[in-house]
Image: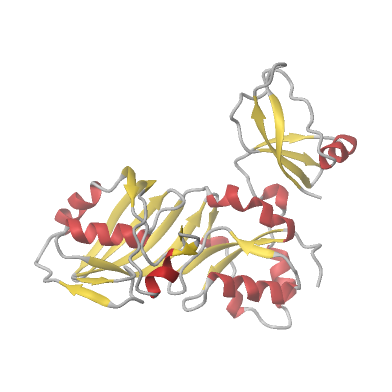
Amino acid sequence: MTDEIAGVLLVDKEEGESSFGSVKRVRRILGVKKAGHAGTLDPFATGLLIVLLGQGTKLSPYLMAGRKRYLATVRLGSETDTMDLTGRVIRERTVKPMTLDQVREKARAFEGEQEQVPPAFSAVKLQGKRAYELARQGVRVDLEPRKVTVYRLEVLSLDLPDLTLSVECSGGTYIRSLAADLGEALETGAHLRALRRLASGPFTVEGAVRVGELDREAAAAGLRKRIIPLKEALPDAWERSVDEETAQRIRDGCPPKLEEGTLSPGESPVKLVAGTDLVALAEVVESPEGPGLRLLRVFH
């Protein structure tokens, strides 16, 4: 195995496979030791999984922070303990006739910044354990609400007892919680029936590869061609070029000086690049001498 491969690979995750399973499959095909992903998808969910390879794992917090876009199917009239189709039904309610306009009116209330309680069956840590571990043991899980933003919530169709949603939201938003909350607003209860991630940050599922469909003999070569270099993995970040001598000093932990008036404090991340290589990510900070750069991640 080698860790020479570094970058980002967009995978269209298949239903029934965990995010870890998808990453493990990519690792095996490419022969890399270190790999991860930027944002988990539940096994029943499909769609865009951003796989991070080698030093690409250092990009995780920056890629996870981007907006997400989903296509979701919500089943009204049935609530489960996991808030999705994998859970145990804990309550069933009658679904009265309703129109698409009525549903859209209720859905509009969920747009904007709000506090959302994560599902009990989630990876949020509580008392040193994952919430889902406690929930599976029958322990009562009370999670604190978190601020999330739903930029757009569009009801695409209504075919009772199901409705289809298009959701654009901030990182950290649980679509399961959103489905359950919408079901409560409609006085029917609900759980998430299907979920597909269409976009995350600057990337879309249209550019993703279905790992399970790759021919075994050509799999490694096919995946290598699809790897996004580190330098291109944050296309919206401000970029500053440095020469090789400066790049080496950065790798030794010495950030370059910032030209006056270039950027304001708080700008983050800033890509420092040498040729085709991403050398480091930095942020602009205030100092007695004026704005300067502080290194966040260094790539060797």
Q: Is 87 positioned to the left or the right of 19 in the image? A: left
As drawn, the residue found furthest toward the left would be 96
Q: Is 102 positioned to the left or the right of 53 in the image? A: left
Judging depth in this view, the residue of 226 and 17 nearest the camera is 17
How did the renderer colour the structure? secondary structure
Residue 281 visible in the snapshot: yes
Q: Position of residue 267 (x, y in %)?
A: 60, 31
Quadrant including the N terminus: bottom right
Q: Residue at x 73, y 72 (%)?
A: 30
Q: Position of residue 116 (x, y in %)?
A: 33, 51
Residue 210 visible in the snapshot: no
Q: How many marks?
A: 0
Q: Residue at x 40, y 53 (%)?
A: 173
Q: Residue at x 51, y 75 (%)?
A: 14
Q: Position of residue 151 (x, y in %)?
A: 37, 45
Q: Is residue 96 above or below residue 69?
A: below
- Residue 142's image quarter? bottom left
Q: Is residue 239 above or below residue 39?
A: above
Q: Position of residue 208 (x, y in %)?
A: 57, 64
Q: Is residue 159 above or below residue 233?
A: below
Q: Is 109 positioned to the left or the right of 126 in the image? A: left
As drawn, the residue found furthest toward the right would be 245
Judging depth in this view, the residue of 141 and 60 nearest the camera is 141
Q: Is 271 positioned to the left or the right of 246 in the image? A: left
- Residue 221's image quarter? bottom right
